[in-house]
Amino acid sequence: MAEIRVNMEVGSDGVAVIEICNPPVNALAIPIIAGLKEKFDEATTRGDVRAIVLTGKGGRFSGGFDINVFQKVHKTGDVSLMPDVSVDLVVNTIEDCKKPVVAAVEGLALGGGLELAMGCHARIATPKTQLGLPELTLGVIPGFGGTQRLPRLVGLSKAVQMMLLSKSIMSEEGNKLGLIDAIVSNGELLKVSRQWALDIAEKRRPYMRSLHRTDKLGSPAEAREILKTARQQAKKTAPNMPQHFVCLDVIEEGIVRGGYNGVLKEAKVFKDLVLSDTSKGLVHVFFAQRAISKVPHVTDIGLKPRHVKKVAVIGGGLMGSGIATALILSNIHVVLKEISPEYLLKGIKLIEANVRSLVAKGKLTPDKAERALSMLKGVLDYSEFKDVDMVIEAVVENIPLKQKIFTDIEKECPSHCILATNTSTIDLNLIGEKTSSQDHIIGAHFFSPAHIMPLLEIVRTEKTSAQVILDLMAVGKLIKKVPVVVGNCTGFAVNRTFFPYSQSAHLLVHLGVDPFRIDRVISSFGLPMGPFTLQDLSGYGVAIAVGKIFTDAFPDRTFHTPLIELLIKNGRNGKNNGKGYYIYEKGSNPKPDPSVLPIIEESRRLANLMPGGKPISVTDQEILEMILFSVVNEACRVLDDGVVVRASDLDVASILGMSFPSYRGGIVFWADLVGVNHVFTSLKKWSQLYGNFFKPSRYLEERAEKGMLLSDPSPSTASRSRL
């Protein structure tokens, strides 16, 4: 492992070059920060040093503060582990240094890296260098003076946009805005930076301290208007994320009371935000997403993924066309098979529409769109399957049909071919039971729309080979998906965990709770839509089919609702025909449909669940918990059955597959934060009042009794993780 250190060399020109060395991105770890302080103090006191250049080793300036420190703070609750960088190093040591300091910036300067550079008296960068302050994505704000210096260097409006959206810019734009003083080639970077530092020392160039500038802040009235607009926008887009509002408050403090006061406020509130649940959740997700690529007995046994160049997709419907789109966009040749010329033409048109929509949104150039579409070939038989590396079956959920497809393709495909199914519910062992290639059979469960949704559940059976799992993980990354390896069971990891979501919502409606209130509560929590809006969107046929699958698989803990069948009987099918729980009119948001209430009343009479025939009285918090704790309860069973490698995998899958809010850390992390005992005692109380649907799982009960977190690993889970 490369040594983490700060180097310093003093040239014959009197310039000390201080170099950050912590590969791969020169993260500002605690020893680096201590080393910077030491080297700057030495350079400042040495008589042979006239000026200083700060740079990073290996073509990268710095990717920012070491996030591992956040993790330690969250585990210990000890915020004193955060070093005093802002005032001690950036203000006192660098910016107030009597010798000029120039940042020689290459590759990237993000977060604390850019903040160090902004503390210098000039910034020279190479072309295409990435600059940004993405701290809000970790639940905090820039903590090394970024909230004060960025507005003073690029103007308030642009700075607010960069911070609140965590949007980085390239050095070329930075140069136009005034963040970067000059752009030079990589080979010239140090030479020009040294000369620039000497020019400042010899008063040929100005000695600029960013914190003292006010020329780009605009008038107080203009500043107030920009901040007011930003707050209104944050209320719409980030209502549950305190760091956005705190960031704007701190920026305002610096404008009203001066940069140094702004820095002091920033340092104080930064430490408060580090300990917030939002930061804990977002930092957890950051590390969880890196952990999913480590799969025991797959990624640690010396195998290398094989290159997948050509894929056959069987079925050109909504899912098949979406999967084919994702593949061709990543330069993988696709053979799309359908059963008739009409269906094939329809599938190709869906793929073309997917690609064209990306062009229309500016996410794809017309050239790249044409190149992608040239990778697609439509067929009506298996003659083109002789040289494919993988087949993805995406036909309707029909077991005999899928079994026939798999016996057919086994005969037609090369021996190394991966045989994948996009089923969302059917047992893979059933699909492949009539084949002799069961070690090649794997689930590639995409989420709709497949070319947009980021999650790919890779479903393995006990017979799936490690090589096939590794190959599909590589394909997932190549097509810009986040692959999570899961076990084989009804609904796999995500759909199984979340099947109680709509069922508990229906149970609450039959206990007398208003469905529109339920949707509002769930949306306020941070999910993009409530369960009834979601049902309207996906259609009632899907709800009935999925409900039946889970009722058959888990009859002891499901709630069968009469409401959906009544809605269909009354000519409703959600958004599909414009009539559901909500009214759908072009050009306006869905509105609650009062004419659905008599149908709900009829369903309540049929179910006869309301105690004494009267609606139950519940708070919004209880509604939220009754719905989401039932999901947590099923997550516990998923963990207990070893369906996922680790609890954090289920957190990532819940965020990417079900849009559980990332700032809450995922379903298991959130439950641990709420308190395992609270989840258990609540479910136990509701199960006594309303029946087995809420009965706590054995895993949850054991964890509550032992005072353990749901995410704490247990030996039994690890041993069963290939289920």
Image: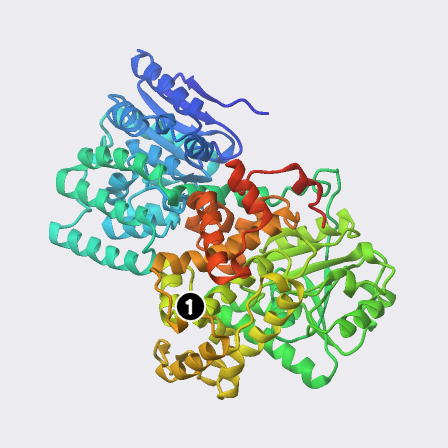
Whether residue 384 is visible: no
Whether residue 624 is visible: yes
Q: Residue furthest top?
A: 47
- Check the image and tell me how it is coloured: rainbow
Q: Foreground residue, 473 or 666?
A: 666
Q: Foreground residue, 277 or 395?
A: 277
Q: Is residue 267 above or below residue 421?
A: above
Q: Residue furthest front?
A: 612
Q: Foreground residue, 697 or 198?
A: 697
Rendered residue at 52%/87% (across/down): 569
Residue 97: x percent and y percent?
Answer: 26, 23
Mark 1 surroundings: few (<14), some (14-19) or many (≥20) residues within 10 A: few
Residue 268 occupies quadrant = top left
User: Label 1: which residue?
Assistant: 611
Q: Which residue type carries mark 1? A: Pro
Residue 334: x percent and y percent?
Answer: 70, 67
Q: Is residue 36 above or below residue 486?
A: above
**What secondary structure is marked by label 1?**
helix
Rendered residue at 62%/60% (across/down): 330
Please give left or right for residue 471 compared with residue 271 in the image. right
Please give left or right for residue 254 compared with residue 478 in the image. left
